[in-house]
């Protein structure tokens, strides 16, 4: 039976190919396809529904239903059986359609006389394009073979849609990948960029979905599979001895590459007339549809592995993709589903912006994008399926919005915005050599946050007085194994060279929670943000921390050294960490290394508990830096990574400012220098309020130094403090409205 249905399928595809090869317009092609399919499958009706927009399906061609309904009948995603097939990405097969749940009767089509219904989604790599339907009067369930045959036709339709085969004569479809598209994502890194799409993994275009020589296609598939297996084995061999995680992923790859089930399905597709690449894509589409609806994280990951492997196989078959190296367009904006920190760093500052479908605010890629000051938008759903290499694209990292192939008016408005920002930057540049001295005479030291060598040139450009926070974990995150002491010492030394005598505060390794090292066994913790992280790891397993401290001392090589320990929650943690530093100094001295000319050992205050530590802690710390990002998340019990809650609580909330007030007072009692290095330090309005609360050192992204200085130089901090005090007394929840009103009456307009 299988053989005869396979040859039927092949015959139909052969006829479809002839029809598609004819030089006819899009609508005529669609009409012909419905006619051929209905005839071949012995059904009275065959109809093609395509998406008009993301939410609306339109009847675009039919054999058997009333012709007047074409381009008139529409339904929403999920509505009726057609809408349901589109939404679920799965076939709907019913012997008695009018009795089905959700059936929607469309009188204009004349379909009431047809009992049986089979609708299969037309989708390409998980992207919904439409639904292909056959209907018959006879009440019968369609056989598995018939479902399969219709899926194969749908697959060909999807490929041809992608190639623009149905565009034209106004009626059928608008061209794909030509219209402007807007994507609303999440801010990963502020900033704006204008440029052209550069796909991290270029889309593979299949130009030959139908093939008439199954034996040859089978051979091509076998050869490609062989080469895939070899490349996975090579990867495995080169990964020998590396961490178990990468090995696990590769093991899964190997399992799929040898999976009979996967191969068998593709062989069946080929036997029915698909080319080898169309067969790979068809199974990939099925896997992507499952991926979309799979709630289990583990299975989702496995499906993701299969997806990656299918991509590799497609590249081997078509000879397209990364190996052939698409040239970088001018002002490249990287578009990807996701990207690792190392890969992003390799592209480096050549990129003008980055847009990801996945990722999170605290992901390593986001950390690197931030360090490189490249605008980043994450969660831009579907962008990799919509964007083509070289497409014009605008990235608004301030709003988390991306315009793909923008209209001219949008592009112009965007250019204006960039010009205004450039103008403001010029104004800030003129302040570069001036102090951040407020009208009341108070001077605030503005420092910058850094984490990469590439950040250091910003010291000059921004006018920062030093590096208030050097996040050392980036060097660990972007490598596949623990960096060696010598490497680290050389890097830290270059950082100090670049700082040219300005202070640099090195924070020891802050890992755990969202920052998991690729070569570190992830801890299966129910609540990683509250788990084994930062100094807790450092104290329990001091090997790496000791090595890092030695590297820092050697890097200083007679210069001043500032070291700060992250995430100290109670006094003894600081005392013990400090002891490690003192021991390292002693040891290095004994080994004959040059001692730092001066050293200061500080703590990051990132948990509310530390604000209430014994006085001895404040006396012992040479300086304290408030890690506002973490402090705020723990104070309000609101995960900084969770989009739902992370903006819920205001930094200028009275309770939080009272905590800041308390910390300022405790440090004043013991004359312990205090700074603030969370993201809020770089927001002019928040920075002004923090300064009014008594902070005299703020450390921020380099790009924020100009705007913060600009505002600080124009206000009297004692006046700001008076407004804050009045707001405290008035019983308001946040001082923001009061301070904002005051600023406005002073003639200021400050963006958040
Ligand atoms: C902070 O928590 O505010 C901070 C500066 O550290 P990180 O953002 O690296 O956790
Ligand atoms: Mg922190």
Image (tube, helix red, strand yellow):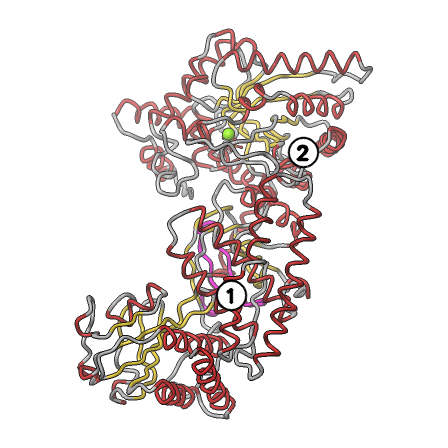
Residue 403 in the magenta stretch? The answer is yes
Left or right: 512, with 183 as reference point = right
The residue located at (47%, 45%) in the rendering is 360
Judge depth for marks 2 and 1 and give the one in front.
2
Q: Quadrant of residue 729?
A: top left
- Toward the viewer: 261 or 2? 2
Query: How many numbered discs sit on the rendered protein?
Result: 2
Residue 51, visible in the rendered structure: no
Residue 194 in percent (x, y) is at 55, 60
Residue at the extreme right: 592
Using the image, tell me which numbered label, if any, was put on residue 387.
1
As helix, strand or loop, the secondary structure at mark 2 comes to loop
Using the image, tell me which numbered label, if any, was put on residue 482.
2
Residue 194, visible in the rendered structure: yes
CA neighbours of label 2 inside 10 A, class few (<14), some (14 to 19), many (20+): some
Position of the C terminus, as image quadrant, is top left
């Amino acid at each position: 039976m299988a053989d005869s249905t396979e040859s039927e399928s092949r015959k139909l595809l052969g006829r479809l190919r002839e029809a598609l090869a004819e030089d006819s317009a899009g609508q005529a092609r669609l009409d012909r396809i419905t006619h051929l399919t209905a005839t071949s499958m012995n059904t009275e009706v065959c109809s093609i529904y395509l998406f008009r927009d993301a939410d609306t399906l339109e009847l675009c061609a039919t054999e058997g239903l009333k012709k007047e309904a074409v381009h008139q009948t529409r339904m929403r995603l999920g509505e009726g059986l057609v809408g349901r097939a589109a939404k679920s990405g799965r076939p709907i097969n019913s012997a008695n359609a009018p009795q089905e749940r959700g059936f929607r009767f469309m009188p204009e089509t004349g379909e009431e006389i047809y009992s049986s219904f089979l609708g299969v989604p037309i989708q390409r790599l998980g992207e919904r394009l439409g639904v292909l339907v056959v209907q018959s009067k006879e009440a019968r369930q369609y056989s598995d073979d018939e479902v399969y045959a219709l899926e194969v036709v749908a697959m060909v339709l999807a490929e041809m849609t992608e190639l623009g085969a149905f565009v034209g004569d106004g009626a059928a479809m608008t061209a794909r990948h030509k219209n402007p598209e807007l994507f609303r994502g999440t801010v990963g890194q502020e900033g704006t960029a204008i440029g052209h799409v550069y796909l991290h993994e270029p889309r593979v275009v299949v130009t030959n979905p139908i093939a008439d020589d199954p034996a040859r296609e089978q051979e091509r598939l076998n050869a490609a599979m062989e080469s895939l297996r070899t490349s996975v084995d090579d990867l495995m061999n080169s990964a020998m001895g590396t961490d178990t995680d990468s090995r696990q992923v590769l093991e899964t790859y190997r399992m799929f590459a040898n999976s009979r089930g996967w191969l068998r399905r593709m062989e069946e597709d080929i036997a029915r007339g698909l080319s080898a690449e169309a067969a790979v894509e068809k199974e990939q589409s099925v896997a992507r549809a499952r991926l979309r609806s799979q709630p289990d994280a583990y299975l989702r990951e496995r499906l993701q592995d299969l997806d990656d492997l299918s991509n590799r196989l497609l590249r081997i078959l078509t000879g397209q993709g990364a190996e052939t190296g698409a040239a970088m367009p001018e002002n490249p904006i990287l578009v990807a589903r996701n990207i690792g920190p190392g890969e992003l760093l390799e592209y480096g500052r050549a990129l003008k912006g980055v847009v990801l479908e996945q990722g999170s605010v605290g992901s390593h890629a986001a950390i690197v994008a931030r360090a490189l000051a490249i605008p980043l938008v994450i969660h831009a759903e579907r962008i990799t399926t919509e964007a083509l290499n070289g497409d014009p694209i605008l990235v608004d990292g301030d709003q988390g919005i991306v315009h793909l192939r923008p209209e001219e008016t949008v592009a112009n408005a965007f250019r204006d915005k960039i010009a205004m920002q450039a103008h403001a930057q010029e104004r800030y540049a003129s302040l570069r050599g001036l102090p951040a001295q407020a009208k009341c005479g108070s001077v605030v030291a503005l420092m910058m946050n850094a984490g990469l060598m590439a950040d250091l040139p910003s010291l000059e450009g921004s006018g920062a007085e030093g590096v208030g926070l050097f996040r050392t974990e980036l060097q660990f995150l972007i490598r596949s194994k623990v960096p060696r002491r010598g490497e680290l010492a050389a890097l830290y030394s270059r950082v100090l060279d670049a700082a040219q005598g300005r202070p640099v505060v090195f924070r020891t390794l802050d890992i755990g929670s969202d920052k998991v090292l690729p070569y570190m066994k992830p801890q299966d913790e129910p609540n990683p943000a509250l788990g084994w992280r930062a100094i807790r790891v450092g104290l329990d397993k001091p090997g790496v921390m000791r090595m890092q401290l030695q590297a820092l001392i050697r890097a200083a090589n007679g210069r001043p050294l500032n070291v700060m320990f992250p995430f100290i929650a109670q006094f003894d943690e600081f005392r013990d960490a400090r002891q490690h530093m003192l021991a390292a100094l002693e040891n290095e001295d004994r080994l004959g290394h040059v001692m730092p000319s001066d050293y200061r050992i500080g703590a990051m205050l990132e948990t509310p508990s530390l604000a209430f530590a014994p006085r001895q802690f404040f006396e012992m710390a040479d300086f304290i830096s408030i890690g506002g990002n973490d402090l705020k998340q723990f104070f309000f019990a609101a995960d900084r990574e969770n989009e739902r809650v992370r903006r819920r609580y205001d930094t200028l909330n009275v309770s939080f400012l009272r905590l800041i007030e308390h910390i300022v007072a405790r440090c004043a009692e013991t004359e312990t220098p205090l700074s603030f290095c969370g993201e809020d330090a770089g927001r002019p309005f928040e920075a002004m309020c923090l300064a009014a609360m008594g902070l005299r050192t703020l450390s921020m992204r380099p790009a924020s130094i100009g705007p913060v200085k600009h505002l600080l130089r124009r206000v009297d901090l004692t006046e700001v403090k008076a407004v804050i005090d009045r707001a405290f007394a008035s019983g308001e929840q946040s001082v923001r409205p009061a301070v904002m009103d005051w600023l406005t009456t002073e003639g200021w307009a400050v963006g958040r």
